[in-house]
Image (cartoon, grey):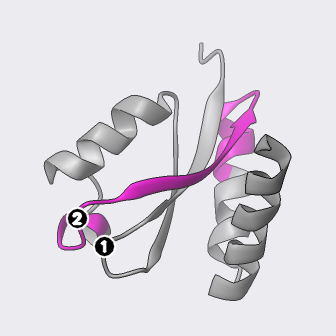
């Protein structure tokens, strides 16, 4: 049973954004940056974590990931900026 799941957005070296989900954000970013992560990010290294959300289940994370992936880049940037302002 998964304790927590996370949805995350990374900024790629070409300034594109990639959204995914995981049960361990830190480990997943390391996998992306090792070149064995998602096919999309392999040619756009390094990636930098710019956003994450904690969810209670894998199902919730997958649903939230789908919602975020449908957002425009501008909407994703606003989401990232709102997250950054909450951290301060």
User: What residue lies at 82% left-to-right and 55% top-to-bottom?
Assistant: 85
Q: Image quadrant of residue 60?
A: top right
Quadrant of the image for the N terminus?
top right
What x and y, as percent, mark residue 61?
67, 44
Label 2 SS = loop
Residue under circle 1?
13
Disc 1 element? loop
* Image position of 21 (left or right of 55): left
On the rendered structure, is 2 left or right of 33? Answer: right
Among numbered discs 2 and 1, the one appearing first in the sequence: 1
Residue 40 place in picture, x, y as percent:
30, 71
Q: Which residue is mark 2?
A: 45
> In this picture, which residue range is highlighted in magenta?
41-62
Left or right of 56 in this view: 45: left
Query: Quarter-wise, where is residue 53 in the image?
Result: top right
Give the x, y percent position of residue 82: 82, 61
């Amino acid at each position: 049973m998964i304790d927590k799941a996370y949805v995350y957005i990374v900024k790629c070296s070409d300034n594109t954004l990639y959204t995914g989900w995981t049960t361990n954000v830190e480990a997943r970013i390391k996998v992306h940056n090792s070149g064995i992560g998602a096919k999309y990010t392999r040619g756009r290294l390094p990636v930098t974590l710019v956003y994450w959300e904690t969810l209670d289940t894998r199902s919730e994370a997958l649903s939230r990931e789908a919602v975020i992936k449908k957002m425009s880049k501008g909407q994703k940037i606003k989401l990232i900026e709102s997250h950054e302002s909450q951290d301060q």
